[in-house]
Amino acid sequence: MLLIQFTNASGARQVGLLEQDRVRVVDGYDSTYGLAREAIARRVGLADLAGAAAGATVLSYADIAAAGRLLPPLDHPDDAHCFVTGTGLTHLGSADTRDAMHKKIGGAVENLSDSMKMFRLGVEGGKPAPGAAGVQPEWFYKGDGSIVAASGQALNMPDFALDGGEEPELAGLYLIGDDGQPYRVGYAIGNEFSDHVTERQNYLYLAHSKLRACGLGPALLVGEAPASVEGVSRIIDAQGRVRWEKPFFSGEQNMSHTIANLEHHHFKYPLFRRAGDVHIHFFGTATLSVADNIVVRPGETFEIEAPQFGPALRNTLAVYATEVAKVKTL
């Protein structure tokens, strides 16, 4: 089942089941958040609840998207209660990338960079037996719900950024129940979007490079993620021409960690199990246009597509002027 959130022609929020190019409105709910909370309270599956509430009203997905009325597939009424985080060095990539990566990590540990050491740890211990904890992944914080752009919205880059590059990824979407238990609402494709030039200056700048916007959706896949996900990442210029294109691979078959292991190491912190909070957690990628020396320019569009997750995610790069904060003494 694929769910989307959108606003109708009157501006009211709605939830719908995506059925190919049609959207069947879910009656009685104006958000995925409310739908998920009700499913937890009733102790029923999200797909069962959404399916039972689906009504007779059917809309055109293309019309909703063209009007710019798509919303992220999960959000929180208060942006401050939505954590956006991620894990890196988790993906094996294509066959060629895997072969090259295994050659890089095959030598003595003391000769490896910190990144290669982390990747090697994941390869060796990122897929523990069910119920066991494996090695910790690299982890980072991106921001709160205010940084999440829906498909069709701009990805806004601050004017002090040195780069704005896509990261086509699978994201887990979660709601913390009143019992303090994380509930996975589903998965979505996303553009984790980072400043790779800043990160390459010094790996300790990773935290700065990740404090950026991200794209998410448009659809939420309810249930388990496919074991193997193959999609395509594109850069489209301002004239609508594809300037760069490459397949990307995700899902556990293409990862050095299990999703359960990544979830364990995120939600082991009590801070991330606060009742009512939403979490958007990016699982990483091995495919970046910056690796092919592509510099994305404002006005160009990122397009990330994986058929299992519905329509493509599209966001155009934009730059905003930042105002220097002046700290005052009280």
Image (cartoon, grey):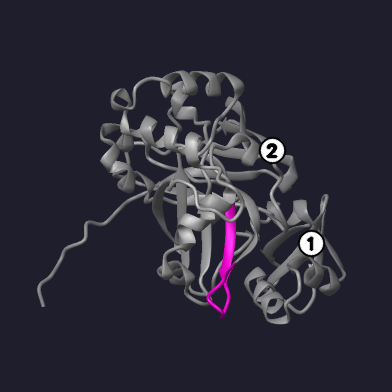
Badge 1 density bin: few <14, some 14–19, many ≥20, Cα 10 Å: many
On residue 235, the disc is none
Q: How many marks?
A: 2
Mark 2: which amino acid?
Ser
On the rendered structure, is 131 left or right of 112?
right
Residue 21, image x, y percentages: 82, 50
Secondary structure of the residue carrying numbered label 2: loop
Secondary structure of the residue carrying numbered label 1: strand
Which residue is under mark 1? 17
Residue 12, image x, y percentages: 67, 74
Task: Choose between 178 and 321: the one closer to the eye.
Answer: 178
Mark 1: which amino acid?
Leu
On the rendered structure, is 24 left or right of 133?
right
Which residue is under mark 2? 228
Magenta highlight range: 171-182
Tell me which residue sits at (62%, 72%) in the image. Answer: 33
Q: Determine the CA span between mark 1 and mark 2.
A: 23 Å
Residue occupying the far right of the picture: 56
**Of pointers 1 and 2, the one earlier in the residue sequence:** 1
Tell me which residue sits at (58%, 49%) in the image. Answer: 259
Name the quadrant containing residue 121.
top left
Task: Choose between 84 and 226: the one closer to the eye.
Answer: 226
Residue 329, image x, y percentages: 10, 73
